[in-house]
Image (spheres, rainbow, N blue to C red):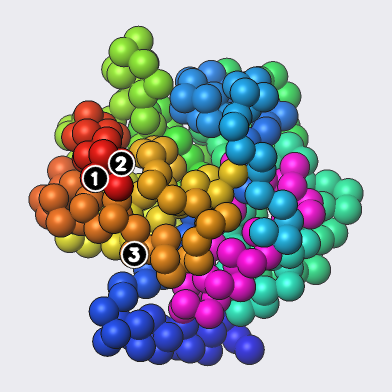
Amino acid sequence: MSAAKNNVKSQKLRDRYEHGGDHIPAFLIASITDACNLFCTGCYARANGLCGEQRETRKEPLLTAEEWSSVFSQARELGVSFVLLAGGEPLLRKDVLEQAAKEMELLFPVFTNGTLLSGKTFELLEENRHIIPVVSVEGGEAATDARRGKGAYGLIREAMGRMRESGMLFGASVTVTAENLSEVTSEAFLNELYALGCRLVFYIEYVPVDVATKHLAPGEEERCALQTAMDARRKTHPSMIFLAFPGDEQFMGGCLAAGRGFFHIGPSGAAEPCPFSPYSDCNVRGKTLLEVLRSPFFKRLREKGLVGGEHDGGCALFEREAEVKALLANIEVEG
């Protein structure tokens, strides 16, 4: 079945649930591992214990490939269209990718650092075009290697070259900071990505890991500049798709987390409103995906206006973290 037909089928399923009182988002973000082979400067996941050495102290084991398979099949049956695979580094979970390969009606953008796109893993993605690599890059060689380690940019270019030669659809995920905004929205940078075969560009606003890195987070002026640049690039590069997160949410009625437009399942199964708001009142190990979407936490976030409503382009839940934590604590007391 074509992607267009799958989307129509999924939309009909979502409409059916909507008529019954359950809103099903089109997107699920699945962080399938908390391990990573890189040590990127300013990594939010490592700084918050979601990735790296801290994972050894986790209370819950990672979801197995079979458990992820159940999550994917439930998502399809609910009408979810896109399952974004993240991490850690998702290519370290080839067993989960093999389960995703079986779900032909879903699209799986896989957000990867690109350094492991080779061998059997590359062959798996090459044979299953509904799994779409989205490679992280910070700009040119100097900026990318400065954050991701010396030689990372070279490995990324090699991987993109292989995907271009294979005719694979792939994208780039660009972390936007106040320092690299001009470079990553420049015609020169995008011309290089286009020449390498990239057709999707996701601009992800940098989320500060501590006070010392807060100056790197885009402010209102940078967000406006990003939107202006994207509008211009859509005209100069009409065959490329440009998306911004969370900036585009301001045109969609506010923050889309907690099931409004997407939700997040962590490596050990915790159901969270967003990867940047890692708080949860339930786990897919004990509940169905539909029950997760009905969680009191998600419902309260929507009712209290912490998602949806006015939006200035920043990460709403990250910026209102104290309110999110207080709301969750109240639910736990009531429960």
In this orientation, which residue lies closer to the viewer: 193 or 209?
Answer: 209
In this orientation, which residue lies closer to the viewer: 29 or 272?
Answer: 272
Q: Amino acid at mark 1?
A: Glu
The magenta stretch spans residue 49: no
Badge 1: few (under 14), some or many (20 or more) residues near its Cα, within 10 Å? Answer: few
Q: Amino acid at mark 2?
A: Glu
Q: Which mark is residue 332?
A: 2
Location of residue 127 in the rendering, given as x and y in whole percent from the top left corner: 80, 68
Quarter of image, res 211: top left
Q: Which mark is residue 84?
A: none
Q: Contact (CB < 8 A) between labels 3 and 1? A: no
Location of residue 96 in the rendering, given as x and y in whole percent from the top left corner: 72, 56
Foreground disc of the pair 3, 1: 1
Q: Contact (CB < 8 A) between labels 2 and 1? A: yes
Q: Contact (CB < 8 A) between labels 2 and 3? A: no
Q: Secondary structure at mark 1?
A: helix
**Which residue corresponds to the image point at 49% horizontal and 21% vertical from the top-left?**
47
Badge 3: few (under 14), some or many (20 or more) residues near its Cα, within 10 Å? Answer: some
Range drawn in magenta:
68-97
Q: Which residue is mark 3?
A: 294
Quarter of image, res 88: top right
Left-right relation of 181 to 50:
left
Q: Which residue is mark 1?
A: 334
Q: CA distance from mark 2 to mark 1?
A: 5 Å
Q: Secondary structure at mark 2?
A: helix
**Which residue corresponds to the image point at 79% horizontal and 54% vertical from the top-left?**
95
The magenta stretch spans residue 78: yes
Left-right relation of 324 to 150:
left
Does any portion of residue 199 appear in the rendered image? no
**Which residue corresponds to the image point at 67% horizontal and 24% vertical from the top-left?**
56
In this orientation, which residue lies closer to the viewer: 11 or 74?
Answer: 74
